[in-house]
Amino acid sequence: MTRTTLFALTLLLGLATSNAAATPGSVPRTVCVFSLVGVHGEPYDTLRDFALTSQSWGVPLTLQPITNERIAAEDLQARQCDAALLTGMRARQFNAFTGSVDAIGGLQDYDGLEMLLAALARPELAERMRQGPYEIAGLMPLGAAYIFLNDRRINNVSKIAGKRLAVLEHDPAQQMMALRIGAQPVPSDISNFANRFNNGAVDVIAAPATAYMPLELYRGVGATGAVVDLPVAQLSLQLVLRHDRFPPDYGQKARAHFLAQFPRAMRLVHAAESEMLFFLPPPDADRSAYDQLLDDARIALTEAGLYDPLMMRLMKRVRCTRQPDRPECTDERE
Amino acid sequence: MNVNDALVRHTLVRHSMLRLLISLACLCSASALWSQPADTDNALTRRDGELFFQRYQDMLSARSADQLSAMIAEDAPLRIALQQPGDEPAQTFTLTRARFVQLRRTLWHFATDIRQRLESPRYTPQADGSLKLTFTETERHTLFNRDSGQRNVTTLTLARRDGEVVVVDLFNDTTLW
């Protein structure tokens, strides 16, 4: 090999190396992972598994656990992270369409939720996943939110009037809902709502079953309370990317990956739901009134601009596919 | 269409409806016959009820959710009329088998010092071969440092499914404290 050939090879190799470094995917990307329990718990484990998959796509990830969700969202906005795992309610500010999956009264069963998430992972909806610099690269079910009561005497909606209801301060939908039913909203956040319920500072909260054991919500329910076995909303975790920091097809591949994790997430949700004490459905006589209340609230919140109308229509289609005899399936309210 | 045509048509419709009603009545009678046990040997006896009641007590002593689940048909309607404070009427809840079993299982998990008493079993054979079993169950326990408990006046309909005697209908008149 002549000296000239060697030089040419070295130059080519050098060029190849510098090209690889310039590929957006080859440099580790930082993901701020909101997790109340830090590196423990399922959301973080799921992201750890995803990081391995991402590595195989040529995009190594550095996971950064953050216990305060507001900070995780702010770090994403401030470019401290390239992506963030947030609850759907928090992610609504980055994408109103997917952020409306958590709408009050949206979907009442998990088969319907799987149907919706499968639709959202389809390439035809990829455009909807992007809003401005952000892209939703996956949704994971956290389980339905249920109403937790510290007193079984609150046995219908009218009796919630005047009771102290913890609402997440970053979710105006919850505050509006509280006011609609005459409850006294107590602004809270994910890190303190459980303590407030457990020490009696609030009477009513909405939470997923997956929070029951970790946050010891059974203490708040106590011997005299109940958990209403009626899904108020389907909560989710959503991976929000700054899409300019990832390869163009990354989001679509990630959405397919997270959809495939649905059964794994649901196993945990079902296990958590089977641990709840005094988990009672609404009284038979009140069931349709509860459904009506949730439907009316969701429609009012959509009209107020809090939920995305297209997502509301998608969810209605899912509800009516699953239960064509629902009264709403013959009206045009959504 | 003149009045006569209308009358003829009306009469035809009435006859058709009459025939339909008669057919429906026959079908109903037939289905009533089908709901009778085809084999009278399958009809449950008081002895079957007593054995079931003994199994129920054993299950409670063992606090076995699996045994409780196996004693209830998966499609059985399970209704709880929960007594309310003051003059309010009881509220009725219909539970799936899984949620009904969960109610007991989670109580056994969280409660301590559990004491159960079963009394006054009554066995009433039914015309369709099933057996009605009624009893009162009182459970006292300590739950989150509080003396609490429940009293259930339980009415079970028992029937044989795949050779096993199981609950096919349950109604609990329940007081929680």
Image: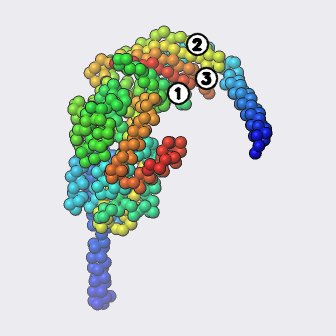
Q: What element carries label 3?
A: strand
**Chain on which label 3 sits:** B
Q: Is mark 2 on a helix, strand or loop?
A: strand
Q: Tell me which amino acid carries mark 3.
A: Arg
Query: In the drawing, what numbered circle is on residue B77?
Result: 1
Residue at the limit of the structure toward the top, as seen here: B120
Q: What element carries label 1?
A: loop
On screen, residue B77 versus residue A282, left or right, reads right
Task: Tell me which corner region of the image, top left, top right, bottom left or bottom right, holds residue A195.
Answer: top left
Residue A88 visible in the current orientation: no
Task: Tell me which corner region of the image, top left, top right, bottom left or bottom right, holds residue A292.
Answer: top left
Task: Tell me which corner region of the image, top left, top right, bottom left or bottom right, holds residue A285.
Answer: top left
Mark closer to the chain start, 3 or 1: 1
Q: Is residue B163 above or below residue A40?
A: above
Q: Name the residue under label 3.
A: B160
Front position among marks 2 and 3: 2
**Chain on which label 2 sits:** B
Q: In this view, does A50 lie above or below A187?
A: below
Q: Which residue is drawn at 72% across and 30% down?
A: B21
Q: Which part of the image, by quadrant, shows the N terminus of chain B?
A: top right
Q: Mark 2 points at which residue?
A: B124
Give whichever of A86, A90 is nearer the camera.
A90
> Can you give x and y, in whole percent of width and height, for residue A115 in the image?
47, 50
Task: Tell me, yes or no, whether dots 2 and 3 are on the same chain.
Answer: yes
Residue A20 visible in the current orientation: yes
**Cβ–Cβ below 8 Å for labels 3 and 1?**
no
Front position among marks 3 and 1: 1
Q: Tell me which amino acid carries mark 1.
A: Pro
